[in-house]
Amino acid sequence: MSRLAGKVALVTGAGQGVGQGIAYALAAEGAAVAVTGRTLAKVEATAAEITRRGGRALALACDVKDAEALARIVAQTVATLGGLQILVNNAQEVPLGALLSVTEDALAAGWDSGPLATFRLMKLAHPHLRGDGCIINLASPAAMRWDASHYGAYSAVKEAIRSLTRAAASEWAADGIRSNAILPLAASPGMEWWTKANPVEAAAFIKTVPMQRVGDCEQDIGRFVATLCSDDCRYINGQSIAVDGGQAYLG
């Protein structure tokens, strides 16, 4: 039997990359998945692929910076798919660059799409997650870099997400809700863009990955998330787990 049969998941930023890979993997384990993103055509393509593989999916357009849109997608997920047991906060606008070059607007967008959207969605989902719920929030190994140059703003918003995750794990475990964060290194469109824009830095970075490769969005990241959401990991709560081939050290 599939490990997530009968579960309903909501995944933000599921039109491509890591979010899409997670959605595919959750569906492969039997979950019905609401896939959300700013571009409806992209999440419709994700939903169509899940359906083609024999799964059940609901495509919903949503800008996670819009509080009303977040409330709407939670309500639509519950009404259409029959509940909500898994929440994956993946969508994120990325404020990269040196501190003197990152604008306040870029940092605000990173905050609104990251920690604030995560905070809002966790609270909106809480009544539905009670009893048998699982929250997966996406942080980043960029915050673990010894040289944080050009990654300070991005790391700041991602570290805020880790703090929210830990708080939810502490406060909501008694409600039957587990909360964990993953820090993935994945072959996402964002990673591909960064690699092309910074080939020398990217080549040097890959050499620091013990497994000498970047993870696959579905097979490496998505399947781990599916396992983390299953009863196989029912005692895992409040953790930050690097899914990165051993590149970051979280000790």
Image (cartoon, rainbow, N blue to C red):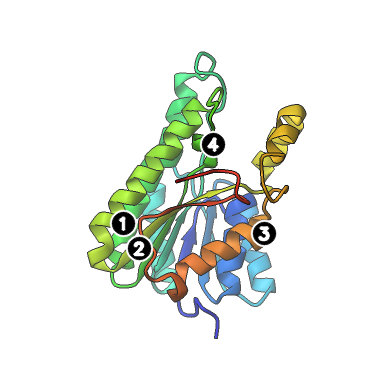
The quarter of the rendered structure image containing the N terminus is bottom right
How far is mark 4 from mark 2, CA to CA?
24 Å
Residue drawn 39% across the image and 64% down it: 236
| Disc 2: which residue | 178
Residue sticking out furthest to the top: 100
| The image quarter in which residue 21 lies | bottom right
- Front in this rendered view, residue 81 or 147: 147
Q: Dot 1 lies on which element? A: helix
**Of 95 and 41, the residue lying toward us:** 95
Check disc 4 and give the amino acid type: Ala
Q: Which element type, helix, strand or loop, lies under badge 2? A: strand
On the question of residue 47 being in view, the answer is yes
Residue 132 in which image quadrant: bottom left
Q: What is the spatial separation of the Cα atoms under label 4 and label 1, in whole angstroms?
A: 23 Å
Q: Position of residue 20 (x, y in %)?
A: 61, 57
Q: Earlier in the sequence, mark 4 or mark 3?
A: 3
Please identify, in this view, whether the residue under mark 3 or under mark 2 is nearer the observer: 2
| Secondary-structure class at tag 4 | helix
Is tag 1's residue or tag 3's residue first in the polypeptide sequence? 3
Pinpoint residue 89: horizontal percent, then vertical percent: 46, 52
Q: Are marks 2 and 1 in contact (CB under 8 Å)?
A: yes
Tell me what residue is drawn at x 69 percent, y 51 percent.
Answer: 211
Q: Is residue 180 above or below residue 57?
A: above
| Residue located at (69% from left, 34% from top) | 194
Q: Which mark is residue 38?
A: none
Disc 2: CA contacts within 10 A as few (<14), some (14-19) or many (>=20): many
Q: CA distance from mark 4 to mark 3?
A: 30 Å
Q: Label 2 is placed on what type of residue? A: Arg
**C-alpha gap between disc 3 and disc 2:** 30 Å
Give the residue at mark 1. Answer: 169
- Report the residue marked by disc 4: 142
Look at mark 3 in the image and give the residue it sits on: 45
